[in-house]
Image: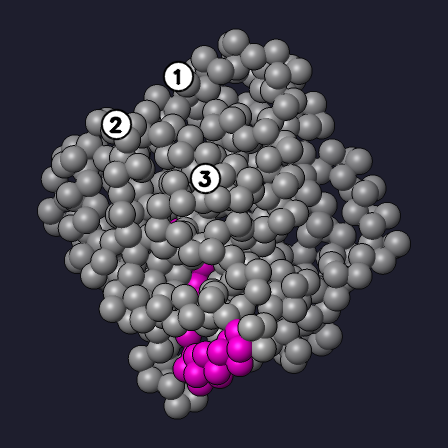
Amino acid sequence: MFRVRRIVYTYVMKKISQSPVIGIVAEYNPFHNGHALHIARAREFLKNRGADNVPVVVVLSSNFTQRGLPALADKWTRARMALSNGVDLVLELPFAYACNAAPEFARGAVDILAATRFVTHLSFGMENVATSLKPTSLKPISSKPGFAIDAITNILIHESCAFKRDLKKKLSEGKSYPKALAETLDGIIPGSGAFVSMPNNSLALSYLLRVLEKNHDLELLPVQRQGAGHHDKAGGPLSSAAAIRSALAEIGDASWNGLWIQKAMPASSLALLEEERKSGRLWMRTEKLWALLQGLLARSSPEELRGCAGMNEGLENLFLKRYVEATSYEDFIGRCVCARYTRSRLQRQATRCLVGVDRWTALALSRNGPPYIRVLGYTSRGRDLLRARRQISHAALNAIPVVTRLAAAQSPAARASAALEFRASRFRELLLPRPDLRHEEKQRPVAL
């Protein structure tokens, strides 16, 4: 029986491996012209290798983003945006990984893409990119002699005694981990600190480290970021998602007609956002978030807060001290920001406390990796990929299950991840103008 399964598995894998499939990790918050350009450039790269119109699979952040805030639109709307603009299959990055630091964010996303067994290329945007970037043959990404991303990864993988000593020293000085890491690397390879401090470069490095750590069979396909920077608030055809969100928050309920955002997004994305706004389902204000956070902190002791994942180094005392002084969510986070704690770290921590992520569940999910692959949406080509994957799962041992409903989660880890997902989704609903606490349970994969 085992031999038959192995023969079937080998046959299916050989058939699939003949066709490249691009994997992308994204938030699409919201989907804009830069995202469409990324997909086009990735496909163009493989077209030049003889593979035309390659399927694209996206692992999409759940209802909260990596910087710790609710997404502008829910994951189902953002999945529909992706499918309407060239993506063939959208998979969920569970809340436990989506609302987390770059290493955990990358761990969950890359492991899900590798677990599909049909994704062959991992594509991502970078502020600085080489013409070729592979785990086995990494070329310099800067004109500076000897400066290459493989040199940085070698340092981070092997972690020499000198590296760990210098990093620990900088952390003891009260610096945040990203800042301490950048300074430590810069002391070894001049220029590398600035490189890893750029948001897309930092995530790219995390993806690469995970691919190397797990020896995933994924070819890296970086794409040079075009247009505005990650946090740039300037408007234009290639503006950032942050600029679009900021503009929408300022506009509020006013008409979008004639505004620059109409040229910054595909028409389908804009139409979906407009539909969600009219339905009272866009998140653009922090007032409700602040009220709920105040309520939590008002009734919590330091010991209770310490039970939350990531709440350490006295952060619970900082939260309890600053919330009574603050007048808004932004004011609270601003009062807590310091050399040790970045804004994103603080926002993620606040959300984890509100959702109720205990440290033991977070640790288990981090060690074991994603316990399932959840489908958010697909086109006909995406459906074909899932059918092929079903053949693989029947033939392969220990294949991660594909689910379309969280209720189908079976293992203890899967049920724990699903429980977090339900809580996070309901919590986001509470922050909307028109909440629907059963919205998550009622959804089914988007089929285009």
Q: Which residue is mark 2?
A: 435
Structural crowding at the residue carrying mark 3, measured as other residues with C-alpha within 10 Å and reported as few (<14), some (14–19) or many (≥20): many
Dot 1 or dot 2, earlier in sequence: 1
Q: Quarter of the image containing the N terminus?
A: bottom right
- Residue 397: x and y, percent? 57, 65
Dot 1 or dot 3, earlier in sequence: 1
Structural crowding at the residue carrying mark 1, measured as other residues with C-alpha within 10 Å and reported as few (<14), some (14–19) or many (≥20): few
Distance from Cα at disc 1 to Cα at disc 2: 16 Å
Q: Quarter of the image containing the C terminus?
A: bottom left
Say what amino acid the circle numbered 1 marks.
Ala
Distance from Cα at disc 2 to Cα at disc 3: 20 Å
Say what amino acid the circle numbered 2 marks.
Pro
Structural crowding at the residue carrying mark 2, measured as other residues with C-alpha within 10 Å and reported as few (<14), some (14–19) or many (≥20): some
Q: Which residue is mark 3?
A: 418
Label 2: element kind:
loop
Whether residue 222 is visible: no
Q: Which residues are magenta?
A: 4-28
Q: Residue furthest right?
A: 161
Q: Which residue is mark 1?
A: 291
Whether residue 8 is visible: yes
Q: Residue at x 73, y 75 (%)?
A: 146
- Residue 144: x and y, percent? 67, 73
Task: Say whether marks 1 and 3 touch (CB < 8 Å).
Answer: no
